[in-house]
Amino acid sequence: MKQSKLLKRDLFGEVRAMSSDEGDMIVRDTNSASPWVRWLARALMRREARILALLDHLHGIPTLFDVNRTCLCRQFMAGAPMQEAKPAHPAYFKEAASLLRKLHRLGVAHNDLAKEPNFLVTVEGHPVFLDFQLAVSSRRRSPLFRLLAYDDIRHLLKHKRTYCQQALTGREQRILANPSLLAKIWMQTFKPVYLFVTRRVLGWSDREGAVNRGQVD
């Protein structure tokens, strides 16, 4: 018998935690997405499915169970989002940096690590990366990919500065002090528009959906 708990509902559909005799899972369902963005919701879902397939069996990344035209089903990971767990031990960020290097070696840039809800702290204290809808893959590690990968690193270090500042190395502090050209252009041009649309028009925030991204009661 399956049990379902709604975790998030927005213009792009619903995210539900499903519990059954076979185990626990997270389901992204685009059937309830607003008609005018349903095509985008499904495009982002397909992108996430492709990336999860590329990262299959990588520890710290949810396993993709199934995907069809309207729904994506992936592994449930027990833990709490970063802003709730507030990881203060250097070991968490060292392991997260190692996981990020593995992603980049496989040709994947997460591209959305600025958001704390996209980091999970497992019950054992290990890092998990969530939400790969905006991720980018590049077999040839193009110049754009390298910029996105660098920004992945800076976003991780920003979180380390927030929760474990005393463990920042001199090299990490230099990276934090030197945003990429892409990041500078984003901050000066597109980010104000993005914030206006997402927060004022759509009512989103970077921490929306944080409470239950990985948890099932």
Image: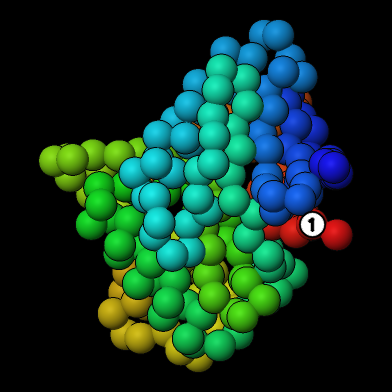
- Residue 148: horizontal and vertical position, in percent? 32, 47
Determine the residue positioned at 54% across, 75% down: 126
Quadrant where the C terminus sits is bottom right
Task: Please indicate, yes or no, whether residue 56 appears anywhere in the rendered image.
Answer: yes
Q: Is residue 54 above or below residue 201?
A: below
Count the marks. 1
Residue that appears at 73% across and 38% down: 15
The spot of residue 4 in percent (x, y) is 84, 41
Q: Is residue 100 left or right of residue 30?
A: left
Q: Residue visible at 68% across and 68% down?
A: 79
Where disc 1 sits, the SS reads: loop
Q: Is residue 188 among what the camera can see?
A: no
Q: Is residue 135 left or right of residue 126?
A: left
Q: Looking at the picture, how far across and down is residue 198, in whole percent?
A: 68, 33
Crowding near the residue tagged with mark 1, few <14, some 14–19, many ≥20 C-alpha atoms within 10 Å: many
State the scheme by which the image is colored. rainbow
The structure residue drawn at horizontal position 44% and vertical position 71%, both measured from the top left corner, is 96
Residue 197 location in percent, x, y? 67, 28
- Locate residue 49 relative to residue 79 in the image: left or right: left
Amino acid type at image mark 1: Val
Q: Is residue 91 above or below residue 2?
A: below
Residue linked to disc 1? 216
**16 or 1, which is in the foreground?**
1
Viewer-side residue, 112 vs 15: 15
Name the outermost residue toward the top. Answer: 36
The residue furthest left is: 140
Q: Quadrant of the N terminus?
A: top right
